Image: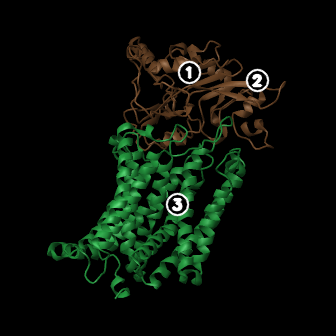
């Protein structure tokens, strides 16, 4: 794991805030992600257990009957967990350092040419955000011309996952370097799902930067593992200690409670704060 | 026809009968090899694994056979380090069984990874934080030790032993075997333990995660302990099976009794530790993450509380009680039942620590994931078992594996 950023005051912590009240479940984020990152697909995508969706939209239901029935759509990218000092669930178990926690950006990378396909990281990830290439990618005729040259296509037998469109960060940094800058503006590095969301439900930026919207929206408390200060904000499976960098906002208590596991008699707000 | 290769003074079945049996098992090997080639050529899409079931039958088989092969290191430890001299009469067979188990584990790992040609990355790009790295290093080194322990047995073949160089080499290797036994025990402690650590460190998986000592979760110690307890049971199981197949007594009762008694004590103490571990996990660890104990054993069609009872009571407490009782050990049926139940018990433990971990949903809006292996997975899992039967059969026929055989079968 890269240690440089540990004591670097300028270290970024890129993260995402998804407002579930705004999400319509249209799936534009999933489509944009697949196109942007050359995500392979099968002829028959009906079996979701072996299809690759870096960004996956789940449909949640409150289990009540009419007129109290309610649903919510929950987009789930990789959570880019920090764990404890960068020991993300997946990073710490990879035997070949094929996945890495970058302390300068907070991004969990996947090194495709290093991965040998043991799938231990997939077992370690409670969010099912990691996907295995069960087949070699097969692109429809002519489609290879439309693949992004900035993202390498993956081969059979290795694991892949959401990278927070890290190639966009690299391109933005290259541009900034040529212009004599070392810092990026907030809008210079945005993920494809953020830009594709027609409802503006996804916000992306540096959680460490108080001028960035993501920081203002959830007010992360870095002294307490980044837990959200906003009472309507929550993270998935917060209690496991994965310390994810994707935050959700919902005005509905049942949605917030669905984000984690609680014993029947437990008060969510007490456990989270 | 092959009498010149058979150890002097020992009786073996006819060559026709022997090789007919080998051919039958060989057919199973060929079936497994066909499945293995399919997986290597076409990829892991030949399996029924999926993105929710990244670890499945093969990893269970690996963990299972390594636990069962634990008889080699623990019997060697007892014989060479503790000085239980009687065990020299069963140590050869324990080594052969261990060799087969570990070779099988290596083969299955070679099939299981998505990019087998990159397998060496685990050594070259080793991540010191990963339990799997520790497994790879210790497992490979210990397999090397088992090869070194197996070689002197091979050199004892009647014809090979005639060559002075091999005779002297075998003799000298026997002389320093205590060093390898000690090395094997040391390495086994770590790889058996790190296999337990593989599940115990998964802090994103509440069914698997355990607190522990320094970097090692409790499963690290439980796996080593259980391998030392249940491994000798498998050695006794295969020995008894061999006696039944050959129709001969091969090891004296006092040797069997001693190993069974030690296994019984190890198993009894292990089961107490396992119950404490389960109790703590159920009442402290899991609730701290929002789960009740029964969340892990309900709302699905397979993983009920029966599996925990089968593991701890049927596959642990009952065989331990039989093995700890002198009456149980002296009754051949009771002994065979006990070691059989023990083998099933440890295999269930390894099963739940791999497959139930994957099956249990962690996010509240997901359901249990159940999985049935494909025929290719089954065939490639049976492949090393069949291969192991052939290695054991050839070793028994052509090598003086059992020092007491001549005396017991005049």
Residue occupied by mark 1: A30
Q: Residues within 10 Å of mark 1 (few under 14, many from 20)?
A: many
Q: Residue at x 62, y 21 (%)?
A: A214
Q: Is residue B139 visible?
A: no
Q: Residue at x 42, y 32 (%)?
A: A135
Q: Earlier in the sequence, mark 1 or mark 2?
A: 1
Mark 2 to mark 3: distance in Å? Answer: 46 Å
Left-right relation of A99 to B314: left
Determine whether label 1 and label 2 are within 8 Å by CB: no
- Chain letter matching colour brown: A
Mark 1 to mark 2: distance in Å? Answer: 24 Å
In the figure, the shade used to draw chain B is green
Q: Nearer the viewer, residue B252 or A237?
A: B252
SS category of the residue bearing label 1:
helix
Name of the residue lying farthest toward the right: A67
Q: Residue A8: horizontal and vertical position, in percent?
A: 49, 30
Q: Residue A200: horizontal and vertical position, in percent?
A: 64, 14
Mark 1 to mark 3: distance in Å? Answer: 42 Å
Residue occupied by mark 3: B223
SS category of the residue bearing label 2:
loop
Chain ID for label 2? A
SS category of the residue bearing label 3:
helix
Residue occupied by mark 2: A251
């Amino acid at each position: 794991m890269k240690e440089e950023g540990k004591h670097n005051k300028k270290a970024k912590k890129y993260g995402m805030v998804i407002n579930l009240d705004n999400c319509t479940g249209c799936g534009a984020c999933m489509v944009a992600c697949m196109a942007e990152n050359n995500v392979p697909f099968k002829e028959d995508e009906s079996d979701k257990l072996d299809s690759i969706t870096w960004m996956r939209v789940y449909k949640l239901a409150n289990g009540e009957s009419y007129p109290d029935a309610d649903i919510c759509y929950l987009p789930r990218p990789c959570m880019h967990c920090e764990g404890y000092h960068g020991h993300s669930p997946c990073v710490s178990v990879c035997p070949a350092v094929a996945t890495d926690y970058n302390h300068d950006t907070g991004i969990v990378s996947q090194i495709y040419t290093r991965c040998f396909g043991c799938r231990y990281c997939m077992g370690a990830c409670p969010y099912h955000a990691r996907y295995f290439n069960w087949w070699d990618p097969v692109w429809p005729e002519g489609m290879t011309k439309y693949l992004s040259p900035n993202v390498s296509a993956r081969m059979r037998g290795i694991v892949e996952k959401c990278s927070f469109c890290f190639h966009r960060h690299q391109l933005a940094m290259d541009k900034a370097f040529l212009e004599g800058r070392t810092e990026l503006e907030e809008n210079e590095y945005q993920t494809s799902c953020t830009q594709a969301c027609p409802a503006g439900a996804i916000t992306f930026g540096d959680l460490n930067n108080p001028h960035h919207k993501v920081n203002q929206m959830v007010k992360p408390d870095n002294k307490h593992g980044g837990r959200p200060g906003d009472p309507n904000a929550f993270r998935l499976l917060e209690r496991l200690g994965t310390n994810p960098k994707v935050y959700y906002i919902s005005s509905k208590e049942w949605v917030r409670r669905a984000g984690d596991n609680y014993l029947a008699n437990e008060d969510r707000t007490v456990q989270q704060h | 026809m092959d009498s010149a290769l058979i150890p002097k003074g020992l009786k073996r079945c006819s060559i026709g009968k022997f090789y007919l049996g080998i051919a039958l098992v060989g057919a199973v090997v060929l079936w497994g090899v066909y499945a293995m080639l399919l997986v290597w050529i076409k990829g892991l899409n030949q399996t029924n694994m999926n993105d929710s079931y990244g670890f499945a039958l093969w990893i269970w088989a690996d963990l299972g056979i390594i636990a069962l092969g634990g008889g080699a290191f623990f019997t060697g430890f007892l014989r060479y380090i503790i000085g239980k001299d009687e065990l020299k009469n069963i140590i050869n067979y324990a080594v052969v069984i261990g060799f087969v188990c570990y070779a099988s584990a290596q083969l299955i790992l070679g099939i299981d990874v998505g990019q087998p040609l990159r397998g060496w990355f685990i050594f070259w790009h080793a991540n010191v934080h990963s339990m799997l790295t520790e497994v790879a290093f210790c497992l490979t080194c210990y397999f090397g030790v088992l090869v070194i322990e197996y070689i002197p047995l091979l050199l004892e073949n009647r014809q090979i032993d005639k060559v002075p160089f091999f005779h002297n080499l075998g003799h000298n290797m026997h002389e320093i075997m205590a060093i390898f036994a000690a090395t094997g025990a040391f390495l086994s402690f770590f790889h058996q333990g790190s296999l337990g650590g593989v599940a115990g460190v998964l802090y994103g998986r509440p069914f698997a995660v355990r607190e522990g000592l320094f970097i090692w979760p409790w499963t690290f110690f439980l796996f080593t302990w259980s391998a030392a307890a249940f491994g000798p049971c498998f050695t006794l199981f295969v020995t008894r099976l061999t006696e039944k197949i050959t129709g001969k007594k091969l090891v004296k009762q006092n040797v069997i009794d001693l190993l069974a008694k030690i296994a019984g004590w190890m198993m009894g103490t292990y089961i107490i530790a396992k119950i404490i571990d389960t109790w703590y996990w159920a009442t402290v660890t899991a609730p701290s993450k929002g789960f009740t104990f029964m969340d892990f054993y309900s709302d699905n069609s397979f993983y009920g509380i029966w599996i925990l009872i089968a593991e701890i009571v049927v596959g642990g407490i009952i065989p331990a009680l039989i093995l700890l009782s002198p009456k149980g050990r002296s009754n051949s049926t009771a002994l065979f039942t006990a070691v059989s139940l023990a083998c099933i018990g440890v295999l269930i433990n390894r099963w739940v620590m791999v497959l139930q971990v994957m099956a249990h949903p962690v996010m509240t809006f997901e359901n249990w994931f159940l999985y049935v292996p494909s025929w290719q997975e089954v065939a490639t899992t049976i492949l090393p078992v069949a291969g192991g039967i052939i290695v054991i059969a050839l070793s028994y026929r052509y090598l003086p594996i059992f020092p007491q055989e001549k005396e017991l079968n005049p």
